[in-house]
Image (cartoon, helix red, strand yellow):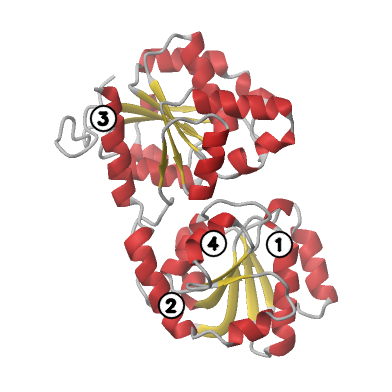
Amino acid sequence: MSPPANTPKGQPGLGGGLKLVLIGDGESPHLLKWARALAPRVQLHAISSRGFLPEFHRLLPDAQRLALNTAPEHGGGNIALVKQLPKVGAWLAQTDADWLHAHYLTSHGTLAWAAKLGWRLRAQIAGSAWGSDILVTPNRGGSWKWLTKKALKSCAITTSDSRHMAERMRELGAGEVMVFPFGLEALPRQNAKKEPWLCFANRGLEPIYRPQLVIDAFARIAAVQPQARLVVANDGSLRAALQADVDARGLAERVSFVGRLDAPAQAAHYARSTWFLSLPESDSVSVSVLEAMGHGCVPLLSELPANRELIGDSARGLIVGSLDDLPARMAALDTARLAVTNREWVAANGLFEPHVQRFLTRLRELSA
């Protein structure tokens, strides 16, 4: 199978010559970001457990995409996906890739190592952990922990977006782990004036992300700051209950639920917001937090090791413990100064491109 016309095969300094198959959720903008970064540098193919976002169709010809059209649960490890193994194995055998790059280890990582074993593929496996596959799923029981260990040990190299998660991966049997943030493709332009007490939240409206705590925190802020408003993006199973709670608190005119947003609409909210709330019970380094910081927002984050990595000891935002003193702590910050500090930090540490180059360099070394 020939590479796409824009593939710089053999070009020095790039990943030219490598044939790589992304395995993940093709409806995820995060997998799409990996595809955009890799497509000009390798002979890229992709397998999706679901379908593919439209941009994938522009990046890759039909012959270089395989959509399994299943509906995996958030926790991964789904029977419907495993049933697709014969189709996956046959397609990968024909593709004859150098690397299988699995995203989310307990589902797509399992698919990769099972296909490699069952069809005796020559490809090596690279695995990228996304957070809950390492920090949550192994704790669900012995079989989940075994599955996670099996996926990690099958990988020649893995990636993690935080030092904390990388250490947990090593505890579970991972070998080489590259640590870098799943950063921004470019530093966003500053093209809007910040509204001093405008808050933005865009994590999933599911229990693991604790959106109820976001509402509770905003209620404390709103009680002290008459100007305070909150925009809640994204969707999930808790949305109706959250909206009912907001109505019951008399905050309906100050809290807006805007659903899932495309990238330009989301960027516009980041640009106008001064504060970004992300309070999950478990997380690695969140790309949403990096995006918010890149737009000059001040993050209000839950007490998690990866969040400490992101903002230091309140150098770039606040760790939210007790809600009682949150409004006072916020009022004490110089948000204009932090907007500059956070953008500078993201420019130096949170851009994706340099890390993709480093990742591909390591794949070439391991392929030699």
Q: Residue furthest right?
A: 248
Of helix, strand and loop, which one carries label 2? helix
**Label pair 4/3, CB-CB below 8 angstroms:** no
Closer to the chain start, of discs 1 and 2, is 1
Percent across and percent down for residue 340 are 38, 77
Q: Is residue 150 left or right of residue 56?
A: right
Of helix, strand and loop, which one carries label 1? helix
Which residue type does callout 4 highlight?
A: Arg
Residue 290 drawn above or below residue 340: above
Q: Is residue 309 left or right of residue 122?
A: right
Q: Nearer the viewer, mark 1 or mark 4?
A: 4
Residue at 68 percent across and 23 percent down: it is 79
Closer to the chain start, of discs 3 and 2, is 2
Marker disc for residue 364: 3
Residue at 40 percent across and 49 percent down: it is 180
Of helix, strand and loop, which one carries label 4? helix
Percent across and percent down for residue 191 are 38, 77
Mark 1 nearby-residue class (10 Å; few <14, some 14–19, many ≥20): many
Marker disc for residue 308: 4
Of helix, strand and loop, which one carries label 3? helix
Marker disc for residue 339: 2
Task: Estimate the spatial distance between the alpha carbons at disc 1 and disc 2, rounded to whole Å.
Answer: 24 Å
| Mark 1, residue position | 211
Closer to the chain start, of discs 1 and 4, is 1
Residue 157 drawn above or below residue 343: above
